[in-house]
Amino acid sequence: MQFDMDGASAYAYTGGKPFDPALPTVVLIHGAQNDHSVWALQSRYLAHHGHSVLAVDLPGHGRSSGPALTSIGEMADWLLVVLDAAGVRRAILAGHSMGSLIALEASRRAPDVVAALALLGTTYPMKVSDTLLQTARDDEEAAIDMVNAWSHSSIAHKPSCPGPGFSVMGGARRLMQRMSARNPAQLFYTDFAACNSYAEGEAAASAVRCPVLFVFGKKDVMTPPRSTKLLTAAMAHGTIVHVDAGHQMMAEAPDAVLDALAGFAASIKPMETQETP
């Protein structure tokens, strides 16, 4: 699904079904140097089981035109404009890593739009080391290799996803390389810097009153579960699910992530998600 955003193109994958804003809507927000394809299994399942889905490509990523936005606040504002363009009045926002900060900030800016939050691979503050920031700025290919290694719990995933013979690490690396090829203007550095500089997370979390789901990877070294106490304490009403995966949990534990998201989405009453005009 393509949107015209003041002359710029914004893309959202709808899970293989036409988008219907009258259905309960789930919005899926990817992380740094990724695009909508990281939600391949989850987006299609939700779209074929009673929900409308918007798996967005952020500006400068995937099929959305650039340049990439430089702050979490700008990304949250962009997301809210996309929802308005799609006719979505209420939605469940599900974000992974950088996308979780975008979802959180969008809930702070437009609480009436956000029916529920699912925060995957999240933490706050989401600080990035100076070494990694410099590498992302000066040698993006090396930064891709570093993050790809740190984001996975194993080099040999059994069973593979989405099928036998598919390399989880190879697929993630190739996706990040493809994002670099499509947008060579230091995309990884821009994304990392936005995560590193985001300073409103504690205030945003303290203001959340809607249902919240946390999904943490037990083997995540990028946003380890022990680093999440500020967020989980601020949103003590949230439900916490741990999956047997590293940071790239949608690929390493796709079924477990799907079970958590689908169960959470089903628990949100339709009238909480989408009101009929």
Image (cartoon, rainbow, N blue to C red):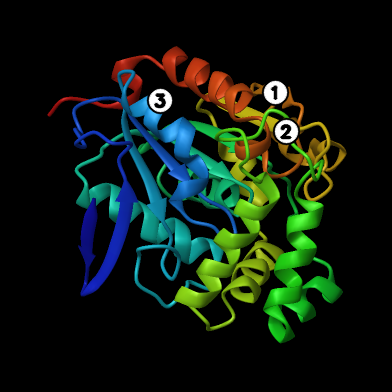
Q: Residue at x 58, y 21 (%)?
A: 260
Q: Residue at x 40, y 25 (%)?
A: 45
Q: Which mark is residue 240?
A: 1
Residue 17 x %, y %:
24, 33
74 relative to 148, above or below: below
Dot 1 and dot 3 residues touching (CB under 8 Å)? no
How far is disc 2 from disc 3 in space, using C-alphas? 21 Å
Q: Residue at x 30, y 62 (%)?
A: 10
Between discs 2 and 3, the one toward the N terminus:
3
Of the residues tagged 2 and 1, which is closer to the observer? 2
Query: Is residue 170 toward the left or the right of residue 109 in the image?
Result: right
Of the residues tagged 2 and 3, which is closer to the observer? 3
**Mark 3, residue position:** 45
Between discs 2 and 1, the one toward the N terminus:
2
Q: Quadrant of the C terminus?
A: top left
Residue 276 x %, y %:
16, 25
**Mark 2, residue position:** 216
Residue 246 x %, y %:
76, 40
Name which residue type carries label 2: Phe
Name which residue type carries label 3: Tyr
Q: Residue at x 60, y 52 (%)?
A: 171
